[in-house]
């Protein structure tokens, strides 16, 4: 499905209408919007599965939302969504279907790519993963020396690392505690070194996760891990089968590396790397939380997939979140988007979303290859909220930038929290609610003066407010809720890409650096070819070589 013949986004009448509306809105303050509508908070709250989404603290009126939905209609968001769910090749630059939604489709569903139903294959791999995970969890998967495997090291990068590493942290309280999990991604040897230094090779299983099985960082780390293992065991190649499994689409390369393809868990080219942790790429997570919890997570994903596919525009949460991002980027010149979870378990959540969003929508040509002249994907950033409050919230509250932010919190702490720590949860959540309130409504100079503050300090202690936020609240951070949250963001990113008319599913922008690194490496090691480098890089390389004593 291409978008040929589509009117350029900023020439659409719906775009012009939004521009005009933005002018009319001017500096309208959230204080005014709330004062004019006592029901605003409840009217602007959506419920999707277990998620409650309050979007009342956004710089929008009912008219804004209507105009944004008209823009979505004019840009064919629903048509592209349906084409995605049908398995059409909407990733046109790679000529691929985009079917991460098939990874969580129920067993009986029928989703076809090139005339073949892919759902049975998805479940066959899930079943194989389940059997393997159960075996490891039961201590029945033994290594070369006969000892049960206790340490699981996932080696992968990008989508083959961020998803499982993030989800492992999120669902830590559901993990089997007598197993150790490590995640190695960086080609800096320090990463693998720190991951394995205290492990017994006889009890260690490496999961090599790579869609292509050609990614230099992953193959380099996997090769070093194999050396470490074989040296530690004093064994030959025959030990690899018990200590290495692969997650990949590329059986040939897996075999070439020396991993038995019987120990390979397959996925498919219609799963993008950053959309893959609910595929075989989630094997480490499945071992950690068990197949049953993993399936609950998939059900959570599926619930939001169905919501996105079927909910009317007025109630469609991913559509709404996507449109709000378009609104701020285009008409408020917002450059970034903060995601601020109030859960320690979500400490890697924003890093995960960075790849999901920025690798998907960090594009500057449209699907026909024309340069866009509107903003595309924002810089996504953030860390757990309370820590952020004591670091960078100053800038969000009183800086000069428009930073829309998502606040994510939970009513209940995890079940196995030490009883003495449960009481801290209300304090955490008091901060959660206080921050969005302060950001929205601020503090006027008169309110500051009323507190007896000296006049010269009044500007410094004034909070302008009017900073837009979404609040996402759920009862608890369960596997299903995690699936719901990720699917929510996946589809939000989809909506934005559809409106901006970019291919959200390719990632050509990562290629150039890879090619240049390959050329530079021999210059570093052999010192040959430096004359082909620009003067800055040549100087830096020379300095590096000299510091290395070469
Ligand atoms: O799973 P692979 O093929 O090793 O790729 C890892 C990552 O590299 C990228 O292609 C970017 O370089 C990501 O899209 C992907 O998640």
Image (tube, rainbow, N blue to C red):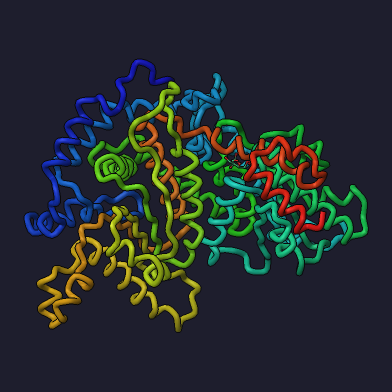
- The answer to whether residue 425 shows anywhere in this view is yes
Count of numbered tags: 0
Picture layout, residue 382 above or below residue 379: below
Residue nearest the viewer, comparing 467 with 137: 467
Picture layout, residue 116 above or below residue 531: above
Figure quadrant of the N terminus: top left
Residue nearest the viewer, comparing 186 with 114: 186
Residue 184 screen position, x and y as percent = 67, 56
Q: Which residue lies furthest to the top in this view?
A: 5
Q: Residue at x 80, y 37 (%)?
A: 255
Q: Which image quadrant is residue 229 in?
A: bottom right
Q: Residue at x 49, y 33 (%)?
A: 505
Q: Residue at x 41, y 69 (%)?
A: 391
Query: In the displayed structure, does residue 81 sit left or right of residue 141?
Result: left
Residue 480 screen position, x and y as percent = 45, 53
Picture layout, residue 276 above or below residue 250: below
Residue 265 screen position, x and y as percent = 68, 41
- The answer to whether residue 499 shows anywhere in this view is no
Picture layout, residue 419 above or below residue 126: below
Query: In the displayed structure, does residue 52 sit left or right of residue 144?
Result: left
Residue 105 screen position, x and y as percent = 49, 38
Q: Residue furthest left?
A: 36
Ligand 1 quadrant in view: top right
Q: Which image quadrant is residue 430 in?
A: bottom left
Q: Which residue is drawn at 70% across and 55% down?
A: 188
Residue nearest the viewer, comparing 375 with 66: 375
């Amino acid at each position: 499905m291409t978008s040929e013949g589509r009117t350029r986004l900023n020439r659409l009448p719906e775009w012009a209408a939004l521009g005009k509306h933005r002018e009319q809105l001017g500096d309208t303050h959230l204080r005014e919007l709330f004062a004019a509508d006592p029901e605003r908070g409840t009217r602007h709250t959506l419920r999707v599965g277990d998620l409650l989404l309050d979007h009342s603290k956004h710089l929008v009126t009912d008219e804004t939302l209507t105009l944004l939905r008209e823009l979505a209609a004019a840009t064919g968001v629903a048509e592209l969504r349906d084409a995605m769910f049908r398995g059409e090749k909407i990733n046109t630059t790679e000529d691929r279907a985009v079917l991460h939604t098939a990874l969580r489709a129920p067993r009986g569903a029928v989703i076809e790519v090139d005339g073949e139903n892919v759902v049975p294959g998805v479940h066959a791999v899930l079943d194989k993963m389940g059997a393997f995970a159960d075996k490891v969890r039961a201590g029945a998967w033994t290594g070369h020396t006969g000892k049960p495997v206790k340490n699981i090291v996932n080696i992968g990068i990008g989508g083959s690392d961020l998803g499982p590493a993030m989800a492992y942290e999120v669902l830590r309280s559901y993990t089997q505690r007598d197993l150790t999990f490590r995640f190695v991604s960086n080609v800096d040897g320090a990463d693998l070194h720190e991951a394995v230094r205290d492990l017994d090779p006889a009890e260690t299983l490496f999961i090599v996760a790579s869609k292509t099985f050609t990614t230099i960082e992953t193959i380099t780390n996997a090769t070093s891990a194999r050396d470490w293992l074989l040296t530690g065991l004093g064994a030959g190649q025959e030990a690899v089968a018990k200590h290495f499994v692969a997650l990949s689409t590329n059986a040939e390369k897996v075999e070439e590396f020396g991993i038995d393809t019987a120990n390979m868990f397959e996925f498919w080219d219609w799963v993008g790397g950053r959309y893959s942790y609910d595929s075989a790429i989630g094997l480490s997570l499945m071992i950690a939380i068990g197949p049953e919890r993993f399936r609950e997570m998939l059900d959570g994903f599926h619930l939001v997939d169905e919501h996105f596919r079927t909910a009317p525009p007025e109630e469609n949460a991913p559509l709404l979140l996507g449109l709000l991002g378009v609104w701020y980027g285009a008409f408020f010149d917002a450059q970034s988007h903060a995601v601020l979870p109030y859960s320690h378990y979500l400490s890697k959540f924003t890093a995960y979303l960075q790849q999901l969003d920025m690798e998907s929508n960090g594009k500057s040509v449209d699907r026909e290859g024309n340069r866009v002249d509107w903003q595309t994907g924002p810089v996504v950033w953030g860390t757990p909220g309370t820590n952020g409050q004591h670091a960078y919230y100053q800038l969000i509250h009183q800086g000069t930038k428009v930073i829309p932010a998502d606040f994510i919190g939970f009513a209940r702490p995890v079940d196995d929290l030490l009883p003495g720590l449960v009481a801290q949860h209300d304090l955490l959540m008091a901060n959660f609610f206080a921050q969005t309130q302060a950001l929205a409504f601020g503090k006027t100079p008169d309110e500051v003066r009323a507190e007896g503050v000296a006049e010269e300090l009044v500007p410094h202690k004034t909070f302008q407010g009017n900073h837009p936020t979404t609040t996402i609240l759920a009862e608890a951070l369960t596997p299903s809720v995690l699936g719901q949250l990720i699917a929510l963001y996946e589809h939000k990113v989809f909506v934005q890409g559809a409106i901006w008319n970019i291919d959200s599913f390719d990632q050509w922008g990562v290629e150039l650096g890879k090619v240049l690194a390959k050329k530079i490496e021999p210059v570093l090691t052999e010192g040959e070819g430096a004359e082909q480098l620009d003067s800055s890089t040549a100087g830096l390389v020379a300095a590096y070589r000299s510091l290395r004593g070469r």
